[in-house]
Structure formats: structure tokens, C-alpha cells
């Protein structure tokens, strides 16, 4: 009931979000995790692992099978009543019940059960890892849209400033204070800015489409994210040492857990392979019964049509005369078959016992399988070692990237302040005719570039902070 309620709330949230056409990062992440195909495939893998665990539990239980058979024999068959071969049709029914149970199998059932539990855990880790990767991908695409939008705003603002300068330059040219070439220079700058604005609009559209595709949303036109001012978040992550982040990553990251589980499962695979060297003991019990639908011989009686007959039983030795005797003519009494369940009761039987199997020689298959699993154990150990090395490399890379991005962002802010002062000074000189249009446009272009660098370095720093927090086990839910 609780899960159903949560699902309804999530669906309603998505519907309201779709109506407003404004998506937050949390909504994007939740929707991607809910609908991403790779996540759904990982969920199917988890369900498959749970079924394998149930199979392992079922190996401890005895097997029980019932059988039934009903046959018709048509053609030349021996009549069980008369003993003669005749063209008759006979019917037979038989039922049986067989049970079997493992007594000892080299502990393979135990090893398989433990391995199945690890497989379920590994599938859960893979599912969670897939969700984390999807979250990181969504956050990157989300930040790209924000960057493109802010870049677009910067270009619009600069274009507005340039148009104001165009009006002022036009007045000064008409008054003869500035040459007409300065007016052409400003007009060329406006044309260049308008081209950049068009490119910025296309960049916003493309980044929206990329995020919509990750979310499997086909309505690209109406898809948009929440317009909000995102500042650089306060974080403690850079105050942590790289080694502390590495230790935390090894505890929380699923890459390590998956590799550890794979190594443990390989050990159990090796144990199961070695168990094939040991004998197996199995108990069994069987019950069977049968019934026939043929008529049966129950005795004899006098032939009512010919009760007696004269037969020669010998002859007189001296005269050779035959010795005659009267004998009874008896015919068989044929009755129908006994009731079906009576026959089942009379004809039943059972068997039970033990079956011992001792492996002696199987074409090296057992030995080769053991060697093959030993190799797999070594392989998974190397994979675990490599996973630990990868975590260390990735954390150091993410840590240095975040620190470098912070320095780049701080440097861009300082550059922006300096460029703004230089631009304001150039503007004052241009307005009084002490600076030509070309030099003024150069100053303005450097100011615009400084603004763009601040926007770019800000979102680059935010994303790299999120990556570093991701390794520290902090989920990606929002940017601020």
C-alpha cells in the first residue's frame, strides 16, 4: 500500500511538472531513474538473480513426481484370457509416484545457495550503480542547459548595451564629433552579436533535446527546466583530503562492491567445481500400480448346447476294439474386468533405496572445470585490485579537477572585474572622442569574453564539485 501511494505521488508530480514544462534537477533525476531502459534492464537482472536464489533453496527440497499412462494395443496380440494370438484391442492403465532426495552431494547445494545470495547482492549493486551513473549524466546535461541559458542572457545584455552605444554614436556622427567609420564599426559589432545570439539559442535547444532524450521524453518543443539563479554551492568536500575521499569512495562506490562480490562468487564456483570430485548419495522411493480393461477367465462350465461327447480313450488289446467314454464338454467362463480401483489396490507395489555415485573418470572434465574456475578466481582478484586502483585514480583526478575549476572560476571573476573597469574607462573615453570605435569594440569584446568565462567556469566548477561529492557518497539531488 505504501509503495502504491508513493508511486501515485510520483506520477502526479510528473504530470504537474509536465504541465508547467519546467523540470527541476530532482524531477529529472527521479524520472530518468524511473524510465531509463538501462535501469529497467538492471531491474530485470535483479529479479532473475532472485529467481536463481529460489532455485538454490529448492535444491534442498525433495523431488516428487507423479506419472500416469493409458495405452491401447491394437492388432495381433496375445489374448491374456485365452492365451491365443488374436486381432484384438486391449487397454492398460498405470500410475506411479516417485520421490527423491539428496543426502550428500559434496556440499554443492550449500555453495550454490551462498553464491545465489551474493548474486542477488551483486545485481542490487549494479542497479544502484546504474542509477548513480544516470544521475550524474542527468546533472551534467542539466548544468549544460543552465550554462547555455546564462550565456544567452549575457549575449542579450551585451547586445542591448551595444545598441545603446549605436544610438549615441549615431548622434555623435551626426554632430560631426565622430567619423562615420565608427558607426559602421558599431553596426558590424551588432551583427556579430546577433549571430552569437542565434548560435546561443541553438545551443540551448540542442542541450534541451539531449536531456529530453536521456529522460525518454519526445516532446522536445515544450520541454524546459526551471529558470533559477544557481550560485556556487557551499561545500566541505574540498577541505577533505584525497585519501579520506578515496576511503569513503571504497566504502560507498558500487564499483568496488561489485568487484568484491564477483571475487566471492568465483570462490564459490571453485568450491562447487571441486565438489564434483566427491561421491553423491541420494535416496529414492517409488510407488506403482496398474489396471487392465481386458476380460478375465474365472472358471469353466458345461456347454449347454453339447454337454457331453464320446471320445476314444483306448482299445482292447486282443480284439482291437475301441474303448469309448463319455466326457463333459466344458467351456470357459469369461467375465469382465474387476473394478478399476480394486485392480489398482491389488496390483500396487513400491520400491525404495539409496543410489551412490562415485566419480572415477569423466574425461578430465571435472579436473579441467576446477582449473578453469581457479583461473576465474585469479581473474576476479585482479579485477578487484584494478577497481581499487581506478577509484584512487578517479578520485585524485576529480579532486584536482575540482580544485583547478575553483581556481579558474576565481581567476575568471577577477578578470571580469578588471575587464569591466577597463570597459567603463574605454566607454568614457569613447564618448568624449578620445578613443576610436575599433579600440572600443576590442575592449567590449574582452569584457564580453570575461563574462562568458565566468559563466563557463562557474558551471564547470559546480559539476566537478558534484562529481567529487558523488565519490564521497553524497547523492545528486540538487545543485544548490
Image (cartoon, helix red, strand yellow):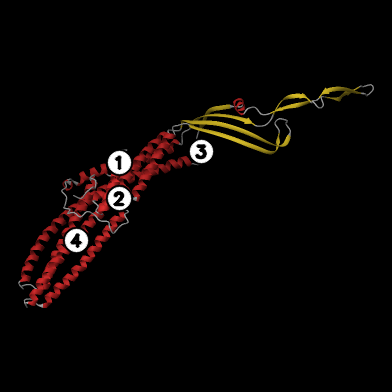
Residue at 34% x, 50% y: name it: 38
Q: Which mark is residue 418?
A: none
Q: Position of residue 226 (x, y in %)?
A: 22, 53
Q: Label 2 vs label 1: CA separation?
A: 20 Å
* Labels 1 and 4 touching (C-beta < 8 A): no
The answer to whether residue 157 is visible is yes
Q: Label 3 vs label 4: CA separation?
A: 75 Å
Q: Position of residue 372 (x, y in %)?
A: 42, 43
For the residue pair 254 and 451, the one nearer the viewer reads as: 451
Question: Could you tell me which quadrant the N terminus lies in?
Answer: top left
Badge nearest the viewer, 1 or 4: 1
List the residue tagged with mark 4. 151
Q: Secondary structure at mark 2?
A: helix
Q: Label 4 vs label 2: CA separation?
A: 26 Å
Is residue 303 left or right of 47 when viewed as pictured? right
- Residue 352: quarter of image: top right
- Circle 2 crowding by C-alpha within 10 Å: few under 14, some 14–19, many from 20: many
* Labels 2 and 1 touching (C-beta < 8 A): no
For the residue pair 122 and 149, the one nearer the viewer reads as: 149
For the residue pair 351 and 32, the one nearer the viewer reads as: 32
List the residue tagged with mark 3. 361
Q: Secondary structure at mark 4?
A: helix
Q: Position of residue 61 (x, y in %)?
A: 45, 32
Badge nearest the viewer, 2 or 1: 1
For the residue pair 411 and 413, the one nearer the viewer reads as: 413
- Residue 432: quarter of image: bottom left
List the residue tagged with mark 2. 32
Residue at 8% x, 74% y: name it: 171
Q: Which one is earlier in the sequence, the residue at label 3 or at label 1?
A: 1
Q: Label 2 vs label 3: CA separation?
A: 55 Å
Amino acid at each position: 500500500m505504501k509503495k502504491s501511494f508513493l508511486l501515485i505521488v510520483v506520477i502526479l508530480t510528473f504530470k504537474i511538472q509536465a504541465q508547467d514544462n519546467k523540470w527541476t534537477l530532482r524531477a529529472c533525476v527521479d524520472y530518468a531513474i524511473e524510465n531509463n531502459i538501462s535501469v529497467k534492464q538492471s531491474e530485470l537482472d535483479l529479479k532473475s538473480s532472485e529467481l536463481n536464489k529460489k532455485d538454490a533453496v529448492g535444491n534442498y527440497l525433495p523431488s516428487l513426481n507423479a506419472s500416469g499412462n493409458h495405452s491401447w494395443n491394437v492388432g495381433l496380440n496375445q489374448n491374456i484370457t485365452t492365451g491365443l494370438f488374436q486381432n484384438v484391442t486391449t487397454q492398460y492403465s498405470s500410475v506411479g509416484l516417485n520421490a527423491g532426495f539428496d543426502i550428500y552431494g559434496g556440499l554443492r547445494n550449500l555453495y550454490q545457495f551462498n553464491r545465489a545470495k551474493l548474486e542477488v547482492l551483486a545485481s542490487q549493486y549494479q542497479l544502484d550503480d546504474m542509477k548513480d551513473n544516470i544521475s550524474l549524466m542527468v546533472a551534467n546535461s542539466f548544468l549544460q542547459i543552465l550554462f547555455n541559458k546564462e550565456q544567452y542572457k549575457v549575449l542579450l545584455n551585451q547586445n542591448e548595451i551595444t545598441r545603446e552605444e549605436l544610438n549615441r554614436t549615431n548622434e555623435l556622427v551626426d554632430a560631426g564629433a565622430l567619423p562615420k567609420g565608427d558607426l559602421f564599426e558599431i553596426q558590424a559589432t551588432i551583427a556579430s552579436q546577433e549571430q552569437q545570439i542565434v548560435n546561443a539559442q541553438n545551443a540551448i535547444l540542442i542541450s534541451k533535446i539531449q536531456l529530453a532524450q536521456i529522460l525518454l521524453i519526445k516532446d522536445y518543443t515544450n520541454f524546459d527546466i526551471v529558470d533559477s539563479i544557481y550560485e556556487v554551492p557551499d561545500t566541505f568536500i574540498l577541505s577533505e583530503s584525497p585519501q579520506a575521499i578515496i576511503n569513503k569512495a571504497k566504502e560507498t562506490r558500487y564499483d568496488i562492491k561489485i568487484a568484491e562480490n564477483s571475487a566471492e562468487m568465483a570462490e564459490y564456483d571453485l568450491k562447487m567445481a571441486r565438489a564434483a570430485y566427491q561421491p553423491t548419495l541420494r535416496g529414492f522411493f517409488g510407488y506403482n500400480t496398474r489396471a487392465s480393461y481386458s476380460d478375465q477367465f474365472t472358471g469353466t462350465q458345461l456347454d449347454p448346447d453339447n454337454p457331453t461327447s464320446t471320445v476314444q480313450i483306448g482299445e482292447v488289446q486282443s480284439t482291437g476294439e475301441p474303448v469309448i467314454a463319455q466326457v463333459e464338454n466344458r467351456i470357459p467362463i469369461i467375465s469382465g474386468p474387476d473394478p478399476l480401483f480394486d485392480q489398482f489396490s491389488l496390483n500396487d507395489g513400491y520400491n525404495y533405496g539409496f543410489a551412490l555415485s562415485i566419480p572415477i573418470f569423466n574425461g578430465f572434465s571435472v579436473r579441467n572445470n576446477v582449473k578453469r574456475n581457479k583461473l576465474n578466481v585469479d581473474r576476479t582478484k585482479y579485477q578487484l585490485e584494478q577497481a581499487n586502483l581506478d577509484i584512487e585514480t578517479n578520485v585524485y583526478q576529480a579532486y584536482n579537477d575540482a580544485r583547478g575549476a575553483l581556481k579558474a572560476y576565481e581567476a575568471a571573476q577577477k578578470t571580469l572585474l578588471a575587464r569591466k573597469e577597463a570597459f567603463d574607462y574605454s566607454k568614457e573615453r569613447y564618448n568624449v572622442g578620445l578613443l576610436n570605435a575599433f579600440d572600443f569594440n576590442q575592449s567590449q569584446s574582452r569584457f564580453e569574453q570575461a563574462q562568458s568565462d565566468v559563466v563557463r567556469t562557474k558551471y564547470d566548477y559546480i559539476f566537478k564539485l558534484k562529481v567529487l561529492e558523488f565519490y564521497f557518497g553524497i547523492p545528486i539531488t540538487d545543485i544548490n
